[in-house]
Amino acid sequence: AGIMPADEARLRDSSQIRVTDYNGGKGTFRVVISGMDTSQVKEILVPVWSRVNGQDDIVWYAAVRSSNGVWYTDVDLRNHKYSMGTYDIHVYVTDKADKQYYLGSATQEVKLNTGKLTMTKNNERDFTVELTGAEIPGAKNIQFPTWSVVNGQDDIKWYTLPNNGSSTRSLLWITQDLVSIMCMHMHRCRMAL
């Protein structure tokens, strides 16, 4: 018989769509669908996309029913080109009679936490460069450029901060030219995905 229009309206009124477990470092979040009688539900599909470039990164996730009757799916930003900004989340329910209808929507803000980049002088030639608090999903490496003010960027050099598995990355940087280090430029990091 399937879900009747009155049943559909009742499900919509009592259902909740929530986003939980956002992890900026891993680039994941969970969509939870709860508060409805799922005895007639065959399947729940959850299309998710970032607002960057429209729906070019849309992925339809199949929700899983847990033992307590709550449905959920885990979203991985890797499937969405690691886009930052607002993600749109829609929920579609298919009943046992194969009738599909729109249940509702939610959004999730995904922000890049670039952390804080510091440079500490150890002695005349050695510096420690440290990036703390960065949550950069999908970054294989993080680099920063340095150059002297003498002759523009003719001596630009990129240094890689090693990934040590935590939100703090550090590097011992030894300068080669004492004259140009008198005034160096150090810019924000770039990430390679």
Image: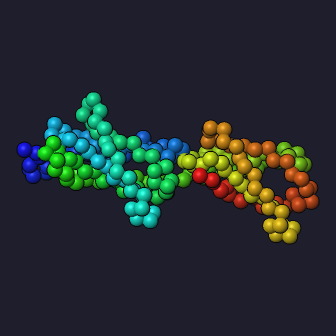
**Residue 32 visible in rendering:** no
Above or below residue 147? Residue 103 is above
For residue 187, side relative to residue 148 (left or right): left
Above or below residue 134? Residue 67 is above
Residue 132 spot, x, y in % from top left = 65, 45
**Residue 117 visible in rendering:** yes
Residue 187, by quadrant, is bottom right
Q: Locate the N terminus and report the quarter of the image it occupies.
A: top left
Above or below residue 177? Residue 130 is above
Residue 118 spot, x, y in % from top left = 72, 50
For residue 114, side relative to residue 27 (left or right): right
Residue 175 spot, x, y in % from top left = 86, 51
Residue 145 spot, x, y in % from top left = 74, 58
Q: Residue furthest bottom?
A: 151
| Residue at x 54% of width, y 48% of height | 137
For residue 26, side relative to residue 14 (left or right): right
| Residue at x 52% of width, y 43% of height | 26
